[in-house]
Every structure is written in C-alpha cells, then in structure tokens.
Amino acid sequence: MTSLTVSGLTKAFGTTRVLDGIDLHVPAHGLTAVLGPSGCGKTTLLRIVAGFADPDSGTIAFGPDTVAGPGRPVPPQRRRVGFVPQEGALFPHLTVAANVTFGLPRAARADRLPELLELVDLDLGVAQRYPHQLSGGQQQRVALARALAPSPAVVLLDEPFSSLDAGLREGTGRAVAAALRATGATAVLVTHDQSEALSLADQVAVMRAGQLVQLDTPSAVYRTPRDPGVASFVGDAVLLPAEVHNGLATCALGAVAVRDAPPGKVQVLVRPEQIRLADASSPDGVAVEVEDLSYYGHDASVRLLVAPDGPRVTARVTGDVLPEPGTRRKAVVSGVCRTFPVG
C-alpha cells in the first residue's frame, strides 16, 4: 500500500469553482474521512483521485508516482484504485462470488474468495446468492470485498453507508473500517455524517465551499476546531460572545475556563456535554429555564433559556434523570473551552 498526496487541486464547472486549491496527504495504511456538507466538492475530489475526471490544475501522487497533473494523466484502470460507490453498484445478474472475484484472473478466484468474504465478515454461505437476496449492509461489504480483491493502491469510498438505516449503518461502518485496517489499505471515506467520520477515521479532512479548512485527528477536529464554522458543523456547538480576563472567559453561562486566549473580546465554544444541570438552589452556575428536550434513550438534548432574557443554549445530559420542561435549574460549565477571535 502507498500514501496519497493531493497538491493544489482545482476544478471548475463553468463559472463555478468546485475545488479551490486542495492540499491533502493521506498516510499509507491510514483511513482518512473527507467530511463536508452536500455540494462542498468532496465527491468531485474523490472522482478526480480515481481518474474519472481531470483537475484543472494541481497534482495527485500515489507514493512517489504522479497520476494526475501536467502532461498525460494516468488512466483510471492503471491507477490501481478500488472504488466503492454509494449504492455498491453490484452486478445484479452475478452471484456474490462472481461479483467479488470479477477483477481477478480466473486461476486466482477460488483461492481468494473465502479470504475476501472472511475479511468483510461475511460467511461463505452467501457466495451463491444474488445482490437482491442480501441486506443493504451485506451488499456494501460485498462491494468492499470486490474493491479489495485486486489489492489496490488506494481504496475510495463515496458515502457507502448513506442508504442504510442507523443501526445497520454503524455496524457496517465498523466492519468496513476493520477490513480496511486488516489489509493495511490506504483509504479515503467521503461522508457528510460527523459521527461516522469521527468514529471510523484516523484523520478527518473538513471541506467547505471547495476548500479544505482543517485536517487533523478526529479528537483535535472536535476539541480544537479551526473556526466557528468547523465547530458548528462537527458536532453540536454553543457559541457565545465573551470577554477574556486572567484565563477565564465571561459569557452568558458565567466565567468559563479557556486555554491560551489573550485578554479581550472573543467568541467562546461550549460543547453541550460540558453543560451540567444543577438544582435551582445551587450556589454555582447561572439560572436557566428548561424549554424542551429531545430524548434518545442513552442521553437527551435539553434546550435552555438563560434567565431572564439571555440566549438559548443546548445541554446534553444522561437519559436517566431528565428535567421537566418549564422548570428552573442552574447551568454549570465544566472543562476548558475553545475561543475564537472576534472580527
């Protein structure tokens, strides 16, 4: 397996610039998630890496070998790329066995099939079934096995779990990530699902309006987002105006701890799970009124109005003890918060 390096990549369709100077390095054997809203250019990026489209400028290299850039580009069939599209795109008239081994020499098919199915956590008993006889999650695993069969240099996955329901999506995602790591594949997963990117990838590339705005570990992207836009997109965010003095930012939720923030006006980021609810009689925290809540079983999102006429904020609490709408509580912020300069 080899690394993937994208340098200065641009692409426009007519007057619309879809990619605007993308620089991205995917280490060998790593899984990188490209995360962004619909229309940000992430699928176009994947298609150019695969060779299905040409960039206007910039280069793409697999290890030391340039496959796209000035001069004659390397065609898709010679890039050794495994591609898993959204719906799997299995051949409906072929069995699972025939789909998985489609790109292999005939002499190697019988030996490779069992190990490829085992790799994606499928029983050999599905080998003679047809795609319509499989669940959505099984179809995506078959599609991955087919992509891995010829030992590609890079595996590209274009929102492969988007059509699956929530429970199946999580299990399939874990199985796919485990299979990729078991083969030592260098992989890029395109998604608009923040939890998917954070839970599956080694690093996350956040795209916005054709630009790559942050590339970091999942933890760093969540805990230290580059700007308020990234903070709001990657997880829920409470953003409040504040003023910093002596390592504390005073905002509507009181004085919260911040790190390496110079004195002056800032915008402070508080994640909902940092907001703890206490009794209204508590000496700590600021007064809030519970407006409503969304219950998810393991936890709940509680929407609060900072009394008497402050901003509305959201807290995330465990699902065992839930506050009643209309009641008054105290909100206490725990941990260290991220700040952003104003202006």
Image (cartoon, grey):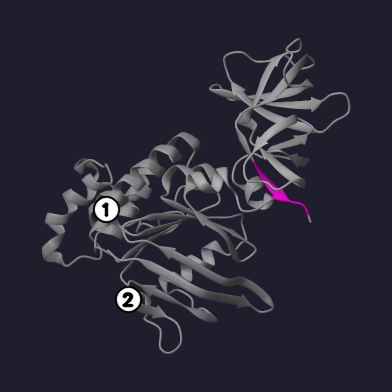
Q: Amino acid at mark 2?
A: Pro
- Give SS at disc 2: loop
Binning the other alpha carbons within 10 Å of mark 1 as few (below 14), some (14 to 19) or many (20 upward) gives some
Q: Is residue 340 found inside the magenta-colored segment of the image?
A: yes
Labelled disc at residue 64: 2
- Classify the position of the C terminus by image quarter: bottom right
Q: Nearer the viewer, residue 89 or 337?
A: 337
Residue drawn 28% across the image and 58% down it: 148
**Residue 284, image x and y in percent?**
72, 18
Start-end of magenta stretch: 338-342
Residue drawn 29% across the image and 48% down it: 179
Magenta-colored segment: predominant secondary structure: strand
Labelled disc at residue 224: none
* Residue 45 vertical placement versus 56 (above, below): above
Q: Nearer the viewer, residue 74 or 238?
A: 238
Q: Is residue 110 left or right of residue 282?
A: left
Q: Which residue, given by chain and number where applicable, does mark 1 sit on? A: 95
Question: Which mark is first along the chain, 1 or 2?
Answer: 2
Q: Nearer the viewer, mark 2 or mark 1?
A: 2
- Classify the position of the N terminus by image quarter: bottom left
Q: Nearer the viewer, residue 216 or 149?
A: 216
Q: Is residue 337 left or right of residue 88?
A: right
